[in-house]
Image: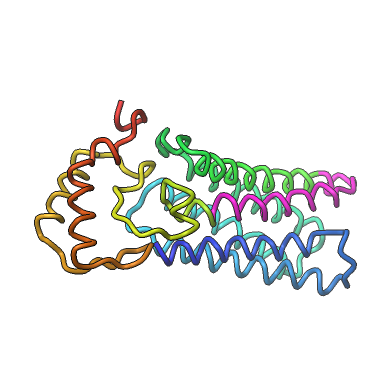
Amino acid sequence: MQLERVGAWLVAIGNILQAVGASQRIDIAEDIRNSYSIIGLTIEAIGIGLIIDSIDEVNEETIGTSLQGVGTLTVLYAALSDFDESQTTELDIKGNLIQASGEAYTLIGVEETLHESIFNKVGFIGVFTVIIGNISEAIAGVKELNGILAEELFEFGAIAQAVGSIVGDAFITVKQDELYAVLTQKKGVYGPPRYLTIDWETAKHSIEKLYNLQPALAVTGHGMFMSGAELTNGLHQLVVNFDQASIPDHGKYVD
């Protein structure tokens, strides 16, 4: 989880740098503007690589994130190449469309409980904002190939990706159901993430087995470590109240 979180924030930082490079409202030299974009794309690619490395199994998230990586590397290749302007623009278009398809693919199979809290809704909207940004940049590229200036649309796309990546990628990777707990890192023993769990009966049995082992220390992928009576009591409460506290009222894998 920590690796995924670091990767998500690198993606956000990379998109912010690209937005700075794309903004015509910031008065900077063209070579510096290009450097912002290249550095931003590089950081984004590294972040995507970390996210992929943190995923243990092949699923929609793995495939979608991999597509995002391919799209990012395509745009980076275009920025570093010596192609003429039209060839570079064509690669940009393809890269942005691949990125958009990757973002969209990560949403496939995400259960309906993703929409249950305001916090998760914001994260979900963030992903769509990134998709809109990618598509906007692709449209801007098509316009430029046809001799139509589209700097404002390209700038909008870059800013949309920056905002969306912060809201969607960076925030959603925290994967806790309560905003208060996320912001304060409040200690507690919680059930598995609702929008990633497909077998609640197995999840419950896993919690029961863990409780029966009576662990003395728990160092998890996110949050603070717990030990002693605090951990034992927390696991006990989770086992006793699992159905009410952890299993959502509705969703793809509970209806």
Quarter residue 19 falls in: bottom right
> Does the stretch in magenta take in 161?
yes
At 37% from the left edge and 48% from the top edge, which residue is drawn?
59
Counting every numbered tag in the picture gives 0
Q: Work out whether residue 255 or residue 117 is closer to the camera in this orientation and state it.
A: 117
- Residue 158: x, y in percent? 73, 54
Instruction: Tell me how the rendering is colored.
Output: rainbow
Residue placed farthest to the left in the image? 212
At 79% from the left edge and 46% from the top edge, which residue is drawn?
140
- Residue 242: x, y in percent? 23, 41
| Numbered range of the magenta stretch | 143-169
As drawn, is 27 to the left or to the right of 139?
right
As drawn, is 77 to the left or to the right of 156?
left
Quarter residue 72 falls in: bottom right
- In terms of secondary structure, what is the magenta stretch mainly? helix
As drawn, is 225 to the left or to the right of 217?
right
Q: Quarter of the image containing the N terminus?
A: bottom left
- Residue 252: x, y in percent? 35, 30
Q: Work out whether residue 79 or residue 42 is closer to the camera in this orientation and state it.
A: 42
Q: Quarter of the image containing the C terminus?
A: top left
Q: Work out whether residue 140 or residue 242 is closer to the camera in this orientation and state it.
A: 242
In the rendered view, tell whether residue 208 sits above or below residue 220.
above
- Residue 152: x, y in percent? 85, 49
